[in-house]
Image (cartoon, rainbow, N blue to C red):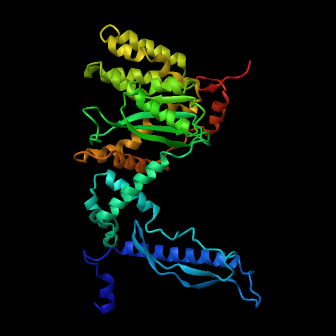
Amino acid sequence: MDHATKKIVEFPSESSEDVLTTILRDGARQLLTQAIQDEVAGYVGAREDLLDEEGRRQVVRNGYLPARTIQTPMGDVPVKQPRVRDRRPGAEREKFESSILPPYLRRTRSLEELLPWLYLKGISTGDFSDALQALLGPEAGGLSASTITRLKAGWEDEQRDWAKRSLKSKRYVYVWADGVYFNVRLEAPGNQRQCILVLMGATPEGRKELIAVSDGYRESEQSWKEILLDLRSRGLAIDPKLAIGDGALGFWAAVRKVWRSTREQRCWVHKTANVLNRMPKALHAKAKGMLHDIWMAETKTAAERALALFAEVFDAKYPGAVECIRKDRDALLAFYDFPAEHWRHLRTSNPIESTFATVRLRTNKTKGSGSRAACLAMVFKLTQAAQKRWRALNGSKLVADVIEGVTFVDGLRKMAA
């Protein structure tokens, strides 16, 4: 076998860097370099008519800024940005700022989202460097424990600023509320159970957004009332059309005092669990199927018949289970008065439950007490990343009809007589 052939068939050793990763990183550097070059060329080209008295161009390329490294999920990518010189007098001079590569950018947005996700998954501050090297390669070890500590402090500042943002231009047609419990002790006084109170909303465009994240007590009307009044003080002036949540929340008492025109929809996932808790396990499958028949019925009349059947079958032996569903009958069936396309979003508070499953994984691994600020910041950062992937409302165009007060019967627009 000649030397050339031998080179072809040799395999890289286990310690060698992954060839594909190297190719991708090199490609990313080339694409980034080209994009920056094109951006600068476009900026300078758009000002080629700016000339001095001797006909020389006033805005020109002038070498390069000092090289720097951007941390990305593929590892560190070195970049050099062309320098732009503007020779005009000070009052006329413009400063070129790259939209691709802001001057203080040190890591990509996707990596910024990875850091709180790792923390919430249980990676301790001191282990971040090793974890990132395992994920992104040996060049990612520059994130020391002190760097992560500074990032966490920045997240806390970001969360506090977000919690004070103006809501004057905002309106939410639907809101979802829940109290998310954590195993970590959040400096709670006494033996009271501390949790994070979460409020999400649907905009007139049908998009879901995080509205509020606050530490409080799930059963406390006062905690929820403080949140709703704070939202009002920051400009959220119009009551939502419908609120969705667990019936045990102190949220409902607060809603009746602050959002007086908002209708109530109980979460069917929570209600099903509450009903089954009052019945023997041997009957859970049958009872769960009958409950499913209620909230999946095509019309409110059919749902009421299914509810009546459930009561007839179980009332004699399990009156507590029947009363649990009967007492909230109107709030459980409120969704029938809204567009059928929206029902899958309105029957449960799953938008919150699914998002915060990851947060619980992090706090299950956290030992001892944690600060309220740190926990709120982690919840905020995780939700901020998850929000980009939240599913918009089906039939988003129908939100305008809900806002205008159009009447819906069994999910369909009521036709004028």
Residue 326 against residue 179 in the figure, above or below = above
Residue visible at 25% across and 61% down in the picture: 126
Quarter of the image with the N terminus in it: bottom left
Does residue 348 show up?
no
User: How far from the left and from the top, in percent, is residue 169?
Assistant: 62, 43
44 with respect to 15 (left or right):
right
Q: Quadrant of residue 141?
A: bottom left
Q: Residue furthest top?
A: 316
Question: In this rendering, does residue 215 appear at all?
Answer: yes
- Asked where in the image residue 63 lies, by quadrant, the reply is bottom right
Q: Nearer the viewer, residue 200 or 62?
A: 62
User: Which of the 4 image quadrants contains residue 253?
Assistant: top left
Q: Residue extending furthest left?
A: 368
**From the viewer's perspective, is residue 387 above or below residue 218?**
below
Q: Position of residue 335 (x, y in %)?
A: 53, 26
* Front one among 234 and 356: 234
Q: Residue at x 42, y 51 (%)?
A: 381
Answer left or right for 187 relative to 86: left
**Foreground residue, 87 or 331?**
87
In this view, 12 is above or below 208 = below
The location of residue 123, given as percent across then percent down, is: 28, 56
Total number of numbered labels? 0
Query: Residue placed at 39% from the left, 49% from the top?
Result: 377
Q: Residue 80: horizontal and vertical position, in percent?
A: 49, 79
Residue 356 is left or right of residue 55, and the answer is: left
